[in-house]
Amino acid sequence: MRCFVTGATGAVGRPLVRALRTAGHDVLGVARNDAKAEELRAAGAEPVVVDLFDESEVVDAVAGSEAIVHFATNVPKLTRMGFPPAWKTHNRLRTETTRHLLAGARAHGIARFVKESITFTYPDRGDEWIDEDVPSDESVKPLRPTLEGERLVEDFTRAGGEGVVLRFGLFYGPGNRAIDEALRTAKLRSFPIAGRESAYMSSIHVDDAAAAAVAALEATPGLYNVVDDDPLTRREYVDAFSDAFDLPKLHIAPQWLVRTVGGAGAKALYPSQRVSNRRFREVTGWAPAVVDARVGWAAISAAHGRGEGATT
């Protein structure tokens, strides 16, 4: 299958391109500059230079594709996350670029459309498992562009397309700048997540996310959770990171402090979300190779010590 991929040189995009090529698919990957284009060529993909905010360019660029895989994001650095303007480009990719890509799909008869999304849209459910039937929390303003993007794909499917939305947990893995950010904050004996220590958080290794995207090319249209098998509490997750990198016990910002400093938007940062991947496993046969973050962080630390998986 000839796949048009946005976000092809990101933390998830790199393993995604490799996974698509290994599965025998041709890849047209969006590249922002010459260095990124060369990286894609080296990975066996064909680079495409296109302004993702220009509808006519996007419609032309996807011509000849058989599937569109929209994984482009622009998550701000940790020091900028608390400023709403820092999320402007990210939100435009969620909404405006999704519209342009769907316009291209309609113009060229491309049925299969796979879109990246996140599980953070779910409400706090304590230690209860969350599946795709649990309604999203529409009250969190910063997450509304994410939900809008999902609905655009749902509309495409209702009109006869084959849209698949993948709600991923917290990404981690080699090539993810979050590792460097976490190691920097660890010098202050803290970790860049917030909330109750007993609250669950669902995560996914970037390699497993890439494998899920490949599986989604054949999945029944719909919305699916893609997380590891064993979500950890925040305390367990942070301790797994500390143990892997031989660090002292790290502090987690308490929920009350985040709520006080971050206001209404901070509500997205601290819910307890124990998300189930059961539906996607049953529909596709996909299963995460990394069952939980304890296993994942240990492997990442070993690779990091060997100088593998440079971050961006």
Image (tube, helix red, strand yellow):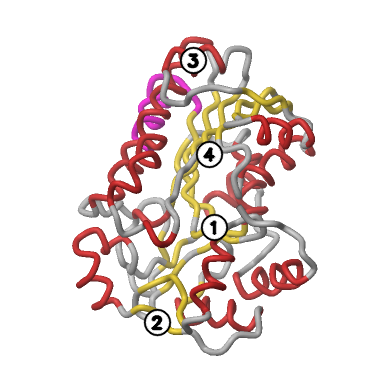
The earlier-in-sequence mark between 4 and 2 is 4
The earlier-in-sequence mark between 1 and 2 is 1
Q: Residues within 10 Å of mark 2 (few under 14, many from 20)?
A: some
Q: Residues within 10 Å of mark 3 (few under 14, many from 20)?
A: some
State the separation of the CA atoms marked 3 and 4. Answer: 18 Å
Residue on which the image places disc 2: 197
The earlier-in-sequence mark between 1 and 4 is 4
Residue on which the image places disc 4: 71
Mark closer to the observer (1, 3): 3
In the image, which residues are magenta? 150-162
Which residue type does callout 4 highlight?
A: Phe
Residue on which the image places disc 1: 171
Q: Secondary structure at mark 1?
A: strand
Specify whether residue 102 is painted magenta.
no
Residue for point 74% across, 41% down: 18
State the separation of the CA atoms marked 1 and 3. Answer: 30 Å
Q: Position of residue 160 (x, y in %)?
A: 44, 19
Q: Position of residue 57 (x, y in %)?
A: 49, 15
State the separation of the CA atoms marked 4 and 2. Answer: 30 Å
Q: Write down the quadrant of residue 80 in the picture.
A: bottom left
Q: From what the image shows, is residue 255 above or below residue 247?
A: above
Residue on which the image places disc 3: 57
Q: Secondary structure at mark 2?
A: loop
Q: Residues within 10 Å of mark 1 (few under 14, many from 20)?
A: some
Q: Secondary structure at mark 4?
A: loop
Q: Residues within 10 Å of mark 4 (few under 14, many from 20)?
A: many
The earlier-in-sequence mark between 1 and 3 is 3
